[in-house]
Each structure stands twice: as C-alpha cells, then as structure tokens.
Amino acid sequence: MATTTIYSKLLLTLTLWVAFTAIRNNLVSGSCARRSGCEQICVDVNITSGEYSCQCRRGYKLHTDNETCVVSPVPKPFLTANNSYVELPSLSDLVPIQTIIELTMKPTSLDGTILFTGYSVLSQTADFILLTLEGGHVVFRYDLGSGPAEIRSLQSIENNTWISIKASRWGRVGVLRVNGDTGVVGLSLGTASRLNLKGYLYLGRHPSPCLMPQFASSSISVTGCVEKVVINYQTLDLNGPQVKNFIVDNCSPCSNGGPCQNGGICKDSTLGNYMCLCPCGFNNTNCETAQDRIPRIAKFTGDGYLMYTDDSITRCVQGARTSFLLTIKPLSTSGLIFWSGQSTFPSVSGHGKQFIALNLCDGMLQLRFNLGTGDALVNVSHPTLFDGNYHTIRVQRTGNRASLSVGRSGGMAISPGSGYYLRTNRKVYLGAVPDMWEVTEGRYSTSFEGCLRTWIFEQCGPVVMLTRDFYVAANIENCLFG
C-alpha cells in the first residue's frame, strides 16, 4: 500500500513537472520566439495554438508574404495655409512638472502659430503652452494658471530653412533654444508650478482662434513642413488614427512615388532628404544609372545590403550548428558583415533576443551570438586583413561553442547559460540590416564597406550565388578587379 502511494505521488509529481515545463516554455518563448518568420515585430496571438502575427515599425509596411517588411514612406505634415492645423491627442499625463518640446520644421512664413495646447478650449485664462513665429523670432509662452511667461529668441530665423526648436520648462522656469544656441531663460508669474493640460495639441493654429489665450499674438498658422515633434523624449505620431488634419499636405520627398527610378525604393532621411535603395543593376542618387552588368562580386559602399530568405540558406544558420566561409575584401575598418536574428517581440525578463553576427570594429574581426541567455563574443585580429586582398573568414558554431578564424588567427567563445539552439526569423543579411541600431539593440550602427566574393556553407546547403539568390538587394555594386 505504501509503495503504491509513493508511486502515485511520484507519478503525479512527474506529470505536474512536465505540464509546468510545457507551460513555462510557451510563456517564456511562445510562437514568436520558437518559429516566427517575422522580419521586424512578432506578436503572439494565441500561445496555445501557436498563432502569431507580424507587424512592421514606423516607416515600413507588410509585404504580401505577411512576414517581410518593405519601406513605406511616412507622411510629413505640410501646413499649407494660414488656417491649417494638425490636431493631436492631449498631453495631460505627460507634462505636469516638466515639459521638453523638441520640434524640427522648415517654415515658409515668418509669422504664425507653430504649436498650442491648453487646459480647455472653453477658457482663455487656464494653463497653456504656445509656440509662435513673430517677425522671424521664435516665441515660447506658457501659463501655469497664475500668469504667463514669454521667452523670445534673440536671433531671427531665415525663411524656407530647416530650424530646430527646443522649448523646455521645469516648474516655473523656462528655456528656449533655437538651432542649438545658448538659450534664453524666462519665468512664469505667480507661485503655480504644475501644468494642467486637458485640451488637444495643435500644430498650426487652433481651429477656433477666438478660444486662444488673450496673450496669443497670432490667430493664423505658420506655414511650412514639420518633420518631427518630440515631447518629453517621446516622438509623436503625426499620422496616427487619432490625428486630424485640416488643409495639410505631405512634404515627404518620397510622397507621390518619390524620385527613385527603375524600381528603386525611396526612404526618408532627415531634414527633407531621402535615400534610394536601388535594385541590382542600377545605381546613383535616384537609381537612374544602369550598370554595365549585374554585379558578380558584391560591393557594399556603406548604404546597401543583401537579404536572403530561402530555406536552403536560413536552415544552415539556425538550429544546433552554424558553419560557413565568407571571402571578403574590407575597405573600411568598421561595419556589420553578417546578421541573422529574431524578430522583436515582448520577451520575458532574463531571455534575450537570439542572433548571430559578424562585424568589423576598429580593425578587429568580431563574432557575437546569443542563444537567449546572454551574448558571447570572439575577437580576432589579423595583421593583413586590410591589405587590399581577399581573405576567407571561417565561422563555426556547435551549440553554445563558437569559433572564428581568418588565416592563422583565431579564437573561440562559449555563450553563458544552457542555450544550445539558435532561433532566428529565417532572414539573413549581408552588409547591413535596415534600422540597424534598433534591430541589433544598439550593438551595431555602421554598414560594411568592401567586397564579398563567396559565401559557402560547410556540410549544409549550397554555395550561395550572392547576387542571384537574394530576396532583397539594395545599393549593391559590382566589385571591379575582383
């Protein structure tokens, strides 16, 4: 009887342990961590059934495969008339004690309201924040309920020129900086030190100018292109579902098809600039120049990349083993050569995003990988790596052990924890990865410059035809004298 009882308890304990382990694994990793093919963001929809959905970051949209993200230009509001405005949600929970407003725009007029938000659209005496242009001078006004502060920039701005405005306050004290100058300081009246804002935030004029504070000197909107607005270090979405526009155009250089030719993809840059991601066979600023031939040896010039999604390639990177040879001729001492990792997804504390990466850092060749329990790093220095010749790099990983070698130089590392298998989103990048700083969580920021001649997997898969087997190619040239 006692033996049966002990056996029953052991069986129950084992059953509970197996069930707990299964639940824990699902909660820790979920469908996104285990098998997601999402390029950017993965969201677990139903952990039990394994259902997940892919999403893209701002500036991208889902491709027809529902996994890959393609560039989608973000509209930038252009206030075209004196009665234009953009209505944004209230800042009520964001700015009571401290307010930091950072705004970048290119005005096409020297007078008008830039930004306004207040306590209520029905009161002229309540709290508010107001930015205006008056005769080319930026003016920052705010009232905490006991009397306004008025801070005016010392220098006037030029019309049709990009400007940056930083208006901040801590309690009653305010500071206005324009184009990074030393700033002008002001102080609001009375003793109140907190802002109470319930109304909408407006770029341009208020839709009912008669409800603006009595201290507002302008009832018209400034005109011009607004690139971004940041409040207390949070970038506002100027195109979200809660945003309303009135007489507002789009000043993105990539709007209406953009300037890129021959199938090039237009990507917004800062201050009204743009970059064309050119397909293989075309180059130059707008992809307007046809190359003499399709590149045979891929040349990376610091703004391009190759992405591969074919299963014959991606399965050789993930799992228990990774082993390949890359033959490169680097032309700069820093840059990301190879990247494959997981999508961004809500992770459980203590479990990092898995990836494997090869890069150059100030002349040092580095292999870094993470199996979910922390980074491992191999550093290798090779005396002739930058002699203008091709060098073959070998990357080998079995479980949590990995080695890196070039010529007679080499090193190895063991990743922390018990991780053994590498899980990725089944995407492999050479030369760079879009939105590198965000995707790599701040590990890398520089693209590879140089030539890549061959890529061979050992004991797995085919010899990769670099300029034929790709899924996406952007700004890849032919390496002459390769």
Image (tube, rainbow, N blue to C red):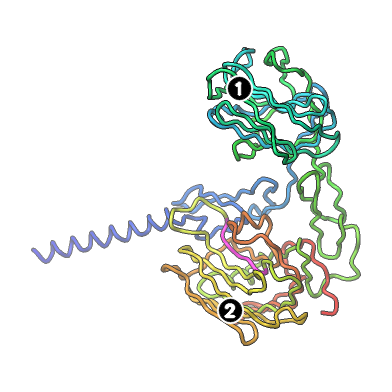
Between 461 and 345, the residue placed more toward the observer is 345
Between 445 and 17, the residue placed more toward the observer is 445
Q: Which residue is mark 1?
A: 188
Secondary structure character of the magenta stretch overall: strand
Please indicate, yes or no, whether residue 239 appears anywhere in the rendered image: no
**Helix, strand or loop status at disc 1:** loop
Query: What residue is rendered at 49% in x and 59% in y?
Result: 352
What's drawn in magenta, residue-wise? Answer: 337-343
Please give left or right for residue 381 compared with residue 111 in the image. left
Give the alpha-carbon distance from disc 2 to disc 1, as whole Å.
62 Å
Residue density around tag 1, few if under 14, some if 14–19, many if 20 or more, within 10 Å: many
Please give left or right for residue 415 compared with residue 473 in the image. left
**Helix, strand or loop status at disc 2:** strand
Residue 83: % across, % down: 79, 21
Query: What residue is rendered at 86% in x and 56% in y?
Result: 285
Q: Is residue 342 magenta?
A: yes
Residue 404, numbered circle: 2
Query: What residue is rendered at 69% in x and 68% in y?
Result: 334
- Indicate whether 347 appears above or below 199: below
Quadrant of the snapshot with the C terminus: bottom right
- Indicate whether 235 appears above or below 67: above
